[in-house]
Amino acid sequence: MENPQKEKLIAALRETAQSIRDIEEEAFRALNESGDNTVYIDKMREKAHLLSELSGRMAPLTADLPGELREPVEDRLARFSASAAAALNLDSIFYMYALLYPEDYSPGDPNDLERFIAALEEETG
């Protein structure tokens, strides 16, 4: 039997992943279609803020996960949030842009958050 708390977490993470894709799309559209660097920078900061709050926002959903699942999930969410917080602290737009993207990323591939969600979906329990 699937864990309803895990399903809620996955749904919330999917929503966050889609929000991030939407923010990135708006950023790239502003930059590429109108050359608006200010909107691009604002959107990269918005992405980083959303990710920096991820661990805290998901805490109510991870609290009731089984122990063997909760700890690695909370750890991964904390790492997503810590990386985003570091990007914000450095005020590095490139770092904000690169959040969630491995070095070997190709357009159209899933990002790290989307891969994490897929791995959670495959987990039993």
Image (spheres, rainbow, N blue to C red):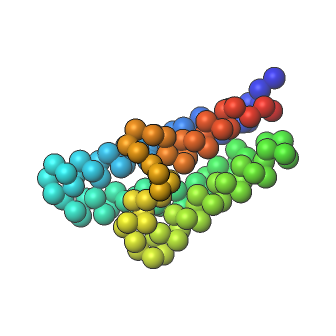
Q: Is residue 113 left or right of residue 56?
A: left
* Quadrant for the N terminus in the image: top right
Q: Position of residue 121 (x, y in %)?
A: 67, 32
Query: Seen from this angle, which residue lies furthest top?
Result: 1
Q: Quadrant of residue 41?
A: bottom left
Residue at the (64%, 54%) spot, across then down: 77
Q: Is residue 25 left or right of residue 84?
A: left
Residue at the (58%, 54%) spot, across then down: 54
Which of 62 and 97 lies nearest the eye of the viewer? Answer: 97
Q: Position of residue 116 (x, y in %)?
A: 61, 44
Residue at the (74%, 30%) spot, across then down: 4
Image: 107 above or below 122: below
Image: 119 above or below 105: above
Query: Seen from this angle, which residue lies furthest right?
Result: 67
Q: How many marks?
A: 0
Can residue 16 be seen from the camera position used here?
no
Query: Seen from this angle, which residue lies furthest bottom?
Result: 90
Residue at the (45%, 76%) spot, across then down: 90
